[in-house]
């Protein structure tokens, strides 16, 4: 025994597998007659960069919303670091699709980021909230945008503001839904660089929905191929292959060739 704890108990604790960052267990989602996800099942270990790929309508965004507890599974369940989805929102940072953003919304970049501090939209940004928000903007190279109206930001600038909002609470898991939509090549490259630097500094887990198979191959340590069902999960070189992609997409044409 050690300090009154039986040796067998110490061995049992040491032999316990690590708790996955994401545990998705046989998740199915049905909207009316439409089966959007069908028995999706995987575990993602902490510290990985996951790319979720698949054709339009494959259920990729729905899977992210299940993890965020914005959509309840019809069957199965999801957990984040061992807790039910939705139980620990402070551990998650989320970057939505930019194409859903209403550019007429009268707000500044610092107000957007501050909404991530408070987890609700601030009527008035307090001093300490502004300090946290400006520091997060500085981390993504966008401090100079703090007081600029969101309507005046370019796609890349707006993406940086949303990323700052997602990272302002130093989350353990960062979820991104098609983060490169509406941004140019340089802004996309900067985005991946910022994510990789944040991950290297904090050990966070990143999960990203993307249509860019080249980005999945070169930036992700794990790839999930989805089309309602899971068609592949593992190393990029193992799942970004012709059989998996053909099964998920129905064909392997020129638009997928960059992944090989």
Image: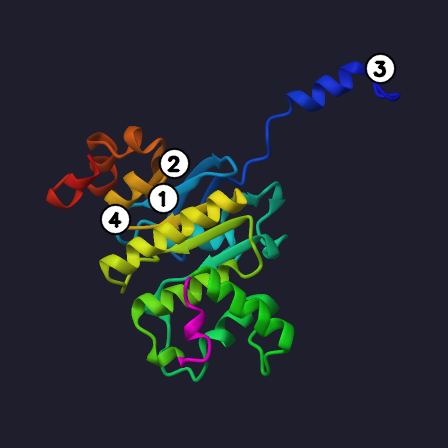
Q: Are marks 4 and 1 in contact (CB under 8 Å)?
A: no
Q: In the rendered view, would you say 237 is above or below 224?
A: above
Residue 35 appears in the rendering? no
Tell me the residue that label 4 is attached to.
Answer: 212
Tell me the residue that label 2 is attached to.
Answer: 222
Q: In the rendered view, would you say 234 is above or below 151?
A: above
Tell me the residue that label 3 is attached to.
Answer: 1
Q: Residues within 10 Å of mark 1 (few under 14, many from 20)?
A: many
CA separation in Å, label 2 and label 3: 40 Å
Tell me the residue that label 1 is attached to.
Answer: 51
User: Which quarter of the figure has residue 245?
Assistant: top left
Figure quadrant of the N terminus: top right
CA separation in Å, label 4 and label 3: 54 Å
CA separation in Å, label 4 and label 1: 9 Å
Residue 199 appears in the rendering? yes
Q: In the rendered view, would you say 77 is above or below 121?
A: above
- The residues colored magenta run 141-149
Task: Please name the residue shown 15% across and 39% down the image.
Answer: 257
Q: Residues within 10 Å of mark 3 (few under 14, many from 20)?
A: few
Q: Is residue 21 left or right of residue 248?
A: right
- Secondary structure at badge 4 equals loop
- Secondary structure at badge 1 equals strand
Task: Please name the residue shown 30% across and 69% down the image.
Answer: 155
């Amino acid at each position: 025994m050690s300090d009154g704890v039986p040796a067998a108990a110490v061995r049992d604790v040491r032999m316990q597998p690590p708790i996955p960052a994401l545990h998705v267990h046989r998740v199915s989602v049905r909207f009316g007659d439409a089966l959007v996800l069908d028995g999706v099942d995987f575990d993602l270990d902490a510290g990985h960069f996951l790319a979720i790929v698949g054709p339009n309508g494959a259920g990729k965004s729905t899977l992210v919303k299940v993890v965020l507890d914005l959509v309840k599974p019809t069957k199965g369940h999801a957990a984040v670091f061992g807790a039910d989805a939705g139980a620990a929102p402070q551990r998650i940072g989320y970057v939505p699709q930019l194409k859903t953003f209403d550019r007429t919304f009268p707000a500044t970049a610092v107000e957007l980021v501050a909404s991530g501090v408070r987890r609700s939209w601030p009527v008035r940004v307090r001093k300490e909230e502004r300090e946290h928000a400006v520091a997060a903007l500085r981390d993504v190279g966008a401090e100079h945008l703090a007081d600029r109206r969101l309507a005046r930001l370019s796609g890349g600038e707006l993406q940086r503001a949303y990323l700052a909002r997602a990272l302002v609470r130093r989350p353990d898991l960062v979820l991104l839904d098609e983060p490169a939509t509406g941004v140019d090549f340089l802004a996309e490259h900067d985005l991946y660089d910022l994510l990789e630097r944040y991950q290297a500094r904090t050990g966070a887990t990143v999960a990203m929905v993307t249509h860019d198979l080249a980005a999945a191959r070169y930036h992700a340590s794990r790839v999930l191929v989805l089309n309602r069902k899971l068609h592949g999960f593992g190393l990029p070189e193992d799942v970004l292959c012709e059989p998996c992609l053909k099964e998920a997409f129905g064909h392997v044409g020129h638009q997928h060739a960059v992944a090989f």
